Image (spheres, rainbow, N blue to C red):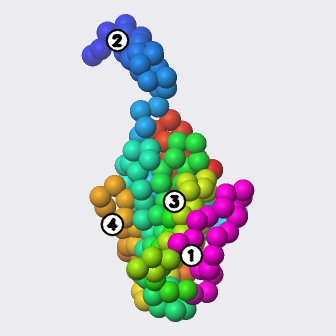
Amino acid sequence: MRSPSALPRAAGALAAAAAVLLTVTGSVDTGTAWFSVRPLTDRSADAAPPVAQVPLAVGDRIELTHTHSVHRRPVYEVFSASAEAGLAMEEMRFDAHGANLPSGPETIDGVTTTFVRDGSGYVVDHHGRPLGTVRMVVGTADVDHRLAAGGREIRLLDLVGPGTGVELYVQTTSGGPIR
């Protein structure tokens, strides 16, 4: 059994470590985060537990790939984990135009994208535009939504059925989802 003074000593050691971290780095945030996917069982509720979680460092990239449901060509969306913004939109890549895909630069929430055609198709740079969370509907097997994060690949259809709404989000170790 621990002595009655063990808990205060442990708390004191933790506070001292945080003070050192704050002095050295200017922050007690170690830059760790979790990228998570949770189903949206009711559009008004967002308390469902995650069906997938991947540890990340702030700044790490998350890639969402799928086959466009209308024109049947691959689409790649790249997000990053941000301590301030949750998920941030970095870029989108595709090799042919399709429904709901950009056809030139766009200004969204005050951020203007850069639209470039290169040898492999189109690249849309979103310049780290803050999103908070991403809500989407999981497509059928021919759409095959997949996530790559933290060295792990997640096929959304392995977690939920087609037509299920999900929320992609980042949670820092110090609190809940960043919105």
Q: Which residue is mark 4?
A: 153
Label 4: element kind: strand
The verdict on residue 105 being magenta is yes
Residue 48 drawn above or below residue 28: below
Q: Identify the residue at image location x=45%, y=76%.
A: 118
The front one of 34 and 40 is 34
Q: Which residue is mark 3?
A: 90
Q: How many numbered discs, if any?
A: 4
Q: Kindly indicate the quadrant of the structure image that contains residue 124.
A: bottom right
- Residue, x 44% and y 47% (percent of image)? 59
Query: Horizontally, is 165 left or right of 94 in the view?
Result: right
Please say if the residues under marks 2 and 3 sit with CB atoms less than 8 Å apart.
no
The amino acid type found where label 1 is placed reads: Val
Q: Secondary structure at mark 3?
A: strand
Report the front residue among 173 and 60.
60
Residue beneath label 1, please? 137
Query: Which segment is the magenta one?
Result: 98-116
Residue shown at 49% from the left, 26% from the top: 27
How far apart are the alpha carbons under marks 1 and 4? Answer: 18 Å
Distance from label 1 to label 2 (Cα)? 49 Å
Distance Cα–Cα, label 3 vs label 4: 19 Å
Q: CA distance from mark 1 to mark 3?
A: 20 Å
